[in-house]
Amino acid sequence: MIKFFTKLFFEPLLYFLLVGGLIYLYYASVTKSASLSKQNIIKLQASELERIERAYEKKYNHPIKHELLYAYMLREFYNRVLLQEAYRLELDKQDTQIAKILLTKMHAILQNSAPFEEPSEKQLYDYYRNHIQEYSKVKHLSFTHIFFADGEDETLQDIYEMLHMLDISPEVGVGLSEVFEGKNRMSGASYEDVAQEFGKYFASKLFALQSKKWSHPIHSKYGKHLVYVEQKEVAEPYAFESVQDRVYRDFLEDNRSRVVDMAYKDILKSYALQVEK
């Protein structure tokens, strides 16, 4: 038996297998170490765990158990890993639904970038004086509208943002309208003219709009409309006290729009449009 093992030990094939095995183990160890060093670290902050605990306790009215908290941690870890892999595979660029969600998120981030500052009464009054036409009794106005018989709110919001962000003129914007039985533009129209054509609700909203801006969707007896008031013929102004709430809302909206527009422009500075021929 000893002679058998002695002969086997000196066999070239055995040396080959032993050396090959050692080389395999070495490279497997090195590869494993390298792969671990290249791993992306997913970090969960203590504040995030506290948020999970608070949300659970609020929903179920009792503290979360350690085992369940660990399960929540793992789920968050898995989600982040999958999201990183999705970015690596550029699925956000290939899937329209994912891209839409990310765009909505980016719009929300930019919209919320405008800091809120409570205006003083003097600021509001100065704004009122500088935009006195908007707070005067309107006798006649001229407007263009984009019509949608049964447009979804999400679609209309997308179109509104495009009109506003790109400052599209009414002459161009009207090309987005569905076929309307009447006219897409009324010139020198009175409140009664508009109420007869579109209904009293539409007229009341229209005559309260600021000029030179696209409105959010307004309902009429026909459907929904995005409206651009081009001109106003006004009479005497309303007293500041009677329109102070409107002035307040308009002041905040104008400030927010200005900050958001600047944020968009700052982002666009880093990009250029190239059309391939």
Image: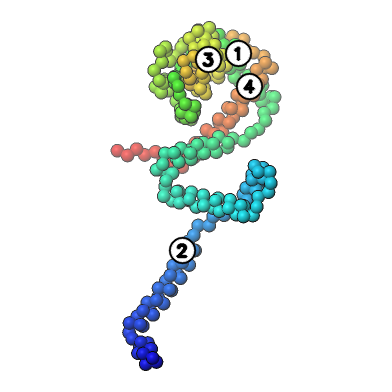
Q: Secondary structure at mark 2?
A: helix
Separation of disc 1 and disc 2 at Cα? Answer: 71 Å
| Label 2 Cα neighbours within 10 Å, binned few <14 / some 14-19 / many ≥20 | few
Residue 237: x percent and y percent?
A: 62, 12
What amino acid is at disc 1?
A: Ser
Residue 157: x percent and y percent?
A: 49, 28
Separation of disc 4 and disc 3 at Cα? Answer: 21 Å
Is 10 situated above or below 174? below
Residue 145: x percent and y percent?
A: 46, 18
Can see residue 233? no
The earlier-in-sequence mark between 1 and 2 is 2
Q: Which mark is residue 247?
A: 4
Q: Secondary structure at mark 3?
A: helix
What amino acid is at disc 4?
A: Val
Residue located beneath label 3 in the image: 202
Residue located beneath label 2 in the image: 35
**Quadrant of the image occupied by residue 110:** top right
